[in-house]
Amino acid sequence: MTVIDHLAVTSLRQPRQSIMGNSDSVMVEKRMARFRPEERSVIHGVFERLQAGDPGKTLRLEALQAFLGTLVPVAMVTRIFWGLCSIEAGRAEPGRAEPGRAEPGRAGASQGPSREQLTVFLADILRGTAEERAPLVMAMSHNAAGRPRAVSCQQVAAFLEDLITAVVHILTSRGRLQGWRPQQMGDTALGVKLLAEQMTSDLRPSDPATCDLSCLEDWVFRVAQVSQYLEVLVADGLDVSLGGGTAPALLPPCRDTDWTHLTVLLDVPTLMFLAPQSEPGRAFPSVSVSPQLPDGCSAPWRLVFSTQLHGESFTKMAAALQHHGPTLLLLRDDRGHVFGGYASTAWEIKPQFQGDSRCFLFSVFPTLRVYTATGYNQHFMYLNQHQQTMPNGLGMGGQHNYFGLWLDSEFGRGHSRARPKCTTYGNPQLSADEDFVLDAVEVWAAGKLPEPPEDEEEEEGKKRILNVDPEVQAMMELTGKTLHSKGFNELQEDFD
């Protein structure tokens, strides 16, 4: 054996010294390689911060609960603890038991997770893949020592309820509600259950009752909100700030909305579902979200019509729909069903269909679902008024007199006819009864305002000259000219 061979063999036999001062595993080293040097110091510091006042080689559940305090509900803190304990940092991958090996997680549960386990947990949540996150989701869904080979869909739903509740707590505590006021919105607890059920409905288990690891991997890969909510939980809950990036905004900004004596149909979890983040922040590079709304959370939302504020007027509602770009129409019928539609462009009053394939219909209660364009036809939007030969009202999907969603111009009644499904959007009947009575309506401007054409800008400039220059007005009156624009402006102000 040569000297070089001897040195090679010797180096293989000696344990590697980790950046944390102990014999480190290959898994931990690979995970740490995902972070930049300045980020690694942040990751290293988390263990000490969580142990404040209770130094040791492991992290106790009580210390984790004390650190998170009221920011994260106790139920979710416990799930995080079991997720940490499930990791065996010396193995190639967590959650994939080798023949003859004990079930992972049992040894660490009695003493608490180690620094290595915390490091792997942080790396997999913040910079991991679906294959790496799925075992943690399984452990947190199991919510006990060890890791089963499968969990039930009900266990996953319970995990999601705790996760979503924790995210809402974080948004509230961190002042990231973006102008929304949950106390004047729909029932948050009900919204949490509906969102958890919606996300669980995307599971594709081979056995209808249980989800194995491959099922969860596929689900985490397809349902981007799972990873996004987990990242918010860790980054904001454990205060792990990496690279100076900002956390993703889960809610769009609410602007120009007078909350005085106002209660809206929307709730925070429903907003998190309908307007997910479209461009993840730099600190969250692994999340790729396909937003329900094209502008995601980048454009502010504004309440432009509400029966609570503006009364039951189809004319006022139609005016609000025409002047504010993309809009979200939200309805509640007299039997409590909540549903609506998203229009990707400003509405126009005309006897033809309009819009494009970005439009969709949705239900909020009793189930939370989105129904996108099927491609069967282009009957996306319809708005008509004061016509003798064509239907007067607002429609989305289907066809005349058989819309997926219809509001009659005689305000107060509508229908949702879909037997078996709406041809345009593939949705079932949205209302409790096919022909329904309206209880409440809201219109939210939910996108960027449209740019006016150049000729309209020139015309608007001429109007402004007449409005602001009293000498011009006086000269026109002396020559017998009538200022017709004054009356139009007053009418427009009534609509606005």
Image: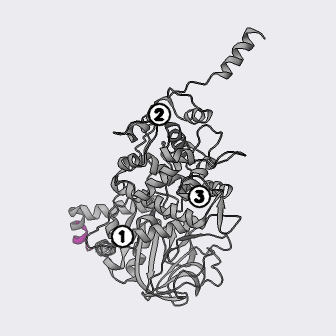
**Residue hosting label 2:** 39
Bin the neighbour count of mark 2 within 10 Å (Cα to Cα): few under 14, some 14-19, many 20 and up.
some
Q: Residue at x 44, y 46 (%)?
A: 235
Whether residue 56 sits left or right of residue 363 in the image: it is left
Residue 426, compared with residue 217, is above or below; it is below
Indicate the amino acid at tag 2: Glu
Where does the image place residue 410, in percent across and percent down from the top left?
A: 44, 89
Marks 2 and 3, how far apart in space? 27 Å
Please tell me the numbered disc located at residue 327. Answer: none
Indicate the amino acid at tag 3: Val
Whether residue 462 sits left or right of residue 364 in the image: it is left
Secondary structure under tag 1 reads: loop
For the residues carrying marks 2 and 1, which lies nearer the camera in this image?
Answer: 2
Marks 1 and 3, how far apart in space? 26 Å
Secondary structure under tag 3 reads: loop
Q: Is residue 403 visible?
A: yes
Residue 109, compared with residue 268, is above or below; it is above
**Residue hosting label 3:** 223
Dividing the picture into quadrants, the one containing residue 190 is bottom left
**Residue hosting label 1:** 185
The span shown in magenta is 475-481
Indicate the amino acid at tag 1: Met
Q: Is residue 323 visible?
A: no
Pointer 2 or 3: first along the chain: 2
